[in-house]
Amino acid sequence: MIWAMIAGMCLVTFLPRVIPLILGRDLVLPGWIRRWLSFFPYAALGSLIFPGILSIIDGKPWIGLAAGACAALLALKARNAIFPVLVAIAVAVALQLLTGA
Amino acid sequence: MGVWAKSDIFRGIRAGIPVAVGYVPMAMAFGVLSTHTGLSFLQAGAMSFFVYAGASQFASLGLLAGGASALAIVLATLVLNFRHFLMSVSLAHRLPLPRGKGSGGLGMALGLGFGITDETFVVASLDGGLTPSFFLGLALTAYLAWFSGTLIGAGFSSLIPPVISRGMGIALYAMFIAILLPGVKKSWANGVVAAAGALIAWGASLLLPGLPSGWRIVIAILVASALGAVVGPADKTEVSASREGAS
């Protein structure tokens, strides 16, 4: 099951990455498809962040929210994802310890 | 070296170092989480070696934990990775590869295409002197960081206390948030689409608790993106706007 999943994921990750490069300049997509596709990352990010962030720590959804809020504040200033990620981990660990994990 | 230029490769490696610094802790978090989700050391390593797509790898763990089938996970991965298709389209126009039999262009497309991630795409797109050699150095640096970070995380996960590994679960979400916000600052439509995606996914989880989370995300992406295409500003440039997608 896991190996089949890895093989399938490998295939569906590899093909979208390489096919346009192989086609080179010959590839032209209709404008409305490009426009629709262009929003995929943001829609994916939204649905991945929420509601999943509530279930980081069982029974304590607010820890995920608090750590996520810290990451968001830092992300407004930081130039990359590293600093927000490290601080969010620290906040999530600290809040667990403070509330007796 | 043939078509490869050593100085450009080194320039690419230097440009890839910040990406690598970001990848190692993230990949370690993936390694730790994957062993907690029930993957073996070998499976965790194989995932980063063969799949090499951060967001999809994290998502697959969440879906596995939620009891999703392999097929649902593969389909969710396909949808998640569709943005790489757009990035590849963009690079195909900016990265001239040799064409025709015996030129080596096909091998270059296969190798360099595998190295496309959100981060390498961004760095490559923002670099003024993008060449195949530059992208090779950049992509290799990022790839090795991701793979070795995964092995470290999966190999030493038992040494990491549960309170820390549970806390590391936030890494994925923090990364998604950090990737999302610059895009939202750039265009309100991106924020509307992300909020719609979250609401649709949340609504689906409440209304259809039996629906696997992979399908939930697929539906949220298709519908929320259509909303963005309808209400978004007309001047939105497609490929460059997708640059902040997850790794």
Image (cartoon, helix red, strand yellow):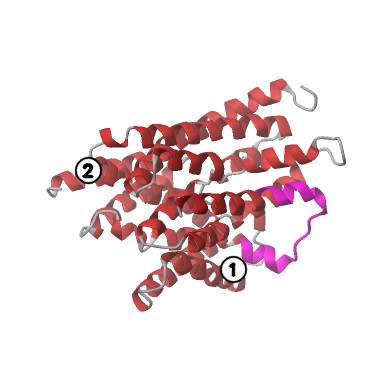
Q: Chain of mark 1?
A: B
Instruction: Decide which of tag 2 and tag 1 comes sooner along the chain.
Output: 2
Instruction: Kindly indicate the quadrant of the structure image that contains residue A87.
Output: top left
Amino acid under label 2?
Val
Q: Secondary structure at mark 1?
A: loop
Number of the front mark, 2 or 1: 2
- Same chain for the residues under marks 2 and 1 in the image: yes
* Magenta-span inclusion, residue A34: yes
Which residue is drawn at the image coordinates 49% and 46% (left, top)?
B54
Q: Position of residue B42 (x, y in %)?
A: 44, 38
Q: Position of residue B175 (x, y in %)?
A: 42, 47
Question: Cα distance, mark 2 to mark 1?
Answer: 42 Å
The crowd level at tag 2 (other Cα within 10 Å; few <14, some 14-19, many 20+) is some
- Judging by the rendered image, the residue that carries numbered circle 2 is B163
Q: Farthest residue in the left direction?
A: A100
Question: How many dots with numbers?
Answer: 2
Confirm or deny contact between disc 2 and disc 1 (CB under 8 A). Answer: no
Q: Which residues, given as a range, are shown in magenta? A: A17-37
Which residue is drawn at the image coordinates 38% and 77% (left, top)?
B208
Left or right of residue A75: residue A99: left
Is residue B184 placed above or below A32 in the rendered structure?
above
Question: Which one is nearer the viewer's eye here, A63 or B102?
Answer: B102
- Judging by the rendered image, the residue that carries numbered circle 1 is B232
Q: Chain of mark 2?
A: B
Q: Secondary structure at mark 2?
A: helix
